[in-house]
Amino acid sequence: MSSRGPAAVEYEDALDESAQEWRRVRIWIEAGRVRRFVVQYETMIGGQRVPVVRYDTAHGYAHREQMFRDRELIKTRRSDRLSLDEALQFAGDDVRRHWRTYRRQFMRNQP
């Protein structure tokens, strides 16, 4: 076990051809296992990236936070039955498949 803590791996990829929609991923790995993660969908508004949906483990468990233009936030806990590896896979897949729906909900300001 390293005294430096988990190693972080970061990457981002465009979800659309115009590079206005992004998936940003950060994974902390220790001893070959996922220890924490963030998977965030961001859209460009007014020349700035704005978070729309974020999956993370910041509160000690895997959950999704869906943001809205009025700054409302809806937090949804993911199943405790999923390992962190499975929750990370689910989050990445969900953002890739459903970003258009999340964007529409964000822009309409409703789930």
Image (tube, grey):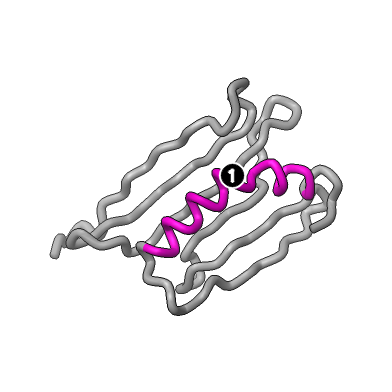
Quick one: which residue is furthest to the left in this view?
A: 1
Q: Residue at x 38, y 62 (%)?
A: 36
Front position in the image: 27 or 81: 81
Outermost residue toward the top? 18
Task: Please state if 41 lies on the left or on the right of 24 as rendered.
Answer: right
* Image height of 103 relative to 62, above or below: above
Say what amino acid the circle numbered 1 marks: Tyr
Q: Which residue, given by chain and number where applicable, does mark 1 sit on?
A: 41
Q: Secondary structure at mark 1?
A: strand
103 or 54, nearer to the observer: 103
Quarter holding the N terminus is bottom left
Residue at the front extreme?
Answer: 97
- Quadrant for residue 54, please give it: bottom right
Residue 10 position, x and y percent, is 37, 42
Residue 68 x %, y %:
77, 52
**Image location of residue 38, percent across then percent down:** 47, 54
Q: At 32% from the left edge and 64% from the top edge, which residue is drawn?
A: 35
Counting other residues with Cα less than 10 Å from the Cα at mark 1, is it few (<14), some (14-19), or many (20 or more)?
Answer: many
Residue at 50% from the left image edge and 60% from the top image edge:
56
Quadrant of image for the C terminus = bottom right
Residue 79: x percent and y percent? 51, 75
- Give the residues in magenta: 86-105
Q: Nearer the viewer, residue 77 or 46?
A: 77
Q: Is residue 91 left or right of residue 7?
A: right
